[in-house]
Amino acid sequence: MKPPVINFSTLQSAVEITATLAFALSGLLAGARKQLDVVGLCIVAGLSAFGGGTLRDVLLDRRPFFWVEHADWLWALMGLCLAAMLFMRRRHLALTERAIQWPDALGLGLFTANGTLVALDAGMPAIVAVLMGVITATFGGVLRDIVCNEIPAAFHDHRPYALCSFVGAWVLVAAAALGWPQWATISAAAATAVALRGVALWTGWTLPVWRINKR
Amino acid sequence: MKPPVINFSTLQSAVEITATLAFALSGLLAGARKQLDVVGLCIVAGLSAFGGGTLRDVLLDRRPFFWVEHADWLWALMGLCLAAMLFMRRRHLALTERAIQWPDALGLGLFTANGTLVALDAGMPAIVAVLMGVITATFGGVLRDIVCNEIPAAFHDHRPYALCSFVGAWVLVAAAALGWPQWATISAAAATAVALRGVALWTGWTLPVWRINKR
Amino acid sequence: MKPPVINFSTLQSAVEITATLAFALSGLLAGARKQLDVVGLCIVAGLSAFGGGTLRDVLLDRRPFFWVEHADWLWALMGLCLAAMLFMRRRHLALTERAIQWPDALGLGLFTANGTLVALDAGMPAIVAVLMGVITATFGGVLRDIVCNEIPAAFHDHRPYALCSFVGAWVLVAAAALGWPQWATISAAAATAVALRGVALWTGWTLPVWRINKR
């Protein structure tokens, strides 16, 4: 009997599950802060996890959606929300918030690469493909914040988040134009976005403030 | 001369009109509370009445929308909004709010059944069909609340609303799997959701609060 | 050598560019007021400029979007946002706000005419085509306000904005039904909406207040 082969796509699946989980948890935390009920929690967690990719697919007119093709994930999401309601305590909140920063950065990178690639395959021009990558990676969080009645953090907190995704998406476009194999383009793009986001988290780097807004 | 036959689909149409009206009125009331102008009132009433079904159809990639096929309803909606602006007085507000709870419950049931059935017919897996039923029944109100700059009541007021729709949608999926005739599956699903919502209204039942959010 | 011919469509392009710019600037100003960062500014400016037409195309199931077919505009938009961040000072803000009212009125007229025409060509009934014209002209601003966590000004400020678009759209439907040539229908519709908006700006005309909302 052969040992199971850990190939690139198994690894990618593992990272993707971790990342989607991190996105869903970010929705859970936002919902808890706003004292949503169980229905609101499930919807906001689902929007955070799948909203970006779904919006991209609506814009690109692609079907089926990820969560239609893999409907099991909807069950997993509901299970996660119920488990959180049963087992999570107040002291876990801050801990979770800190702990998900890193899988969230992974998700940012991987969703960027995936979203840009899908748009390139659909024949989009480079700048549109980059925009689709950024939408895939960040609009789950944007929809989460709109439903929670907040200005989206990605537009407002002056920390580089969408910008890391933007740079990573251009790396993918460049690598694809150079004819790199797919695993290499995805890895390079995702790694760039994750590394930039990691540096931003590590150093507390903030975006320059528009002089009009200086306080 | 034969008396007019009241068959299932005539009855269904009557219930549907009543329910759509109740949804539109809930939009009108929300708009009045936010002091919207005549344009805002019409749009918010329209979003409340047709937003859920339209979002479902965008996600399922179905056309034409209900309000394109039956464009007369748009006229009726505008007429309703103008009539409300002319004839409604402040003392009517609380009255209307109480009075629409019951047709609104009817709408919840019927739109759930209809939305779930449409998604099943489009070949969606059970859990996705249920989600589409819930979206059809509740996202009109969610869009209404987002436009009115509120956290959606369906996610926040800790009263069972989407949950009644969720249970009703599963009844439809089960009845369809058992091969019941269509009128029976629709009736059973709608009746379940309406009855649950009625009990919830009657008893003031609230959803359990997540311990993190206990005040 | 012949002088360059200024024909209708060259003129239309010039007006369209001016109008899109005005819409983008309205997004920039709203973003500045909310102290968004550079990413937020670009997205909100883009939503204001292209959101209405994109929503119309999603509802009508039309592809490609304007900003996919003319991807250069995305570069222009980013350039505009960066230039604004570098060169705009606080004292420019009020000036810009006053200065864009007139190109914004142009945009209202032109986008109304264009949106209604596209919907008529897609075989929509008159009232739906009118609604699509209004959505094209006003929902960029609506999405801008939703993202900025405000009740949309078009629904709330009791000034005729969507209403001018509504009347202009009916002019287009009537002219098209009378068999006017396309340049005449577009011109008549756009001129009506622009003129109404101009009069509304000039006279400070406000919509009647619903008695329920009288303060």
Image (cartoon, coloured by chain):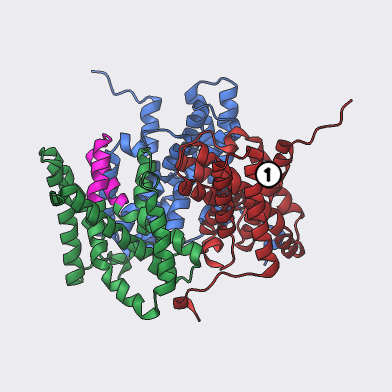
Chain colours: A green, B red, C blue
Residue A146 drawn at (x, y percent): 43, 60
Please tell me which residue is depicted at 35% across the width and 46% down the height of the picture: A66
Front in this rendered view, residue B187 or A124: B187
Mark 1 belongs to which subunit?
B
Which region shows up in magenta?
A112-136
How many badges with numbers are in the image?
A: 1
Please tell me which residue is depicted at 67% across the width and 45% down the height of the picture: B187
Q: Quadrant of the C terminus of chain C?
A: bottom right
Badge 1: how crowded within 10 Å, few (<14), some, or many (20+)? some
Q: In the visual, does B85 lie left or right of B158?
A: right
Residue A130 falls within the magenta-colored stretch: yes
Q: Can residue C182 be seen at all in this image of the molecule?
A: yes
Front in this rendered view, residue A13 or A158: A13
Front in this rendered view, residue C144 or A184: A184
Residue beneath disc 1: B16
Please tell me which residue is depicted at 52% across the width and 35% down the height of the picture: C191
Front in this rendered view, residue A122 or A93: A93
- Position of residue C16 relative to residue A163, above or below, is above
- Position of residue B121 relative to residue C84, above or below, is above
Please tell me which residue is depicted at 53% across the width and 43% down the height of the picture: B54
Give the main secondary structure of the magenta stretch: helix
Q: Quadrant of residue C180?
A: top right
Q: Quadrant of residue C29?
A: bottom left
Q: In the visual, does A185 lie left or right of B185?
A: left
Residue B55 drawn at (x, y percent): 50, 45
Q: Can residue B79 be seen at all in this image of the molecule?
A: no
Residue C175 drawn at (x, y percent): 57, 26
Secondary structure, mark 1, is helix
Residue B132 falls within the magenta-colored stretch: no
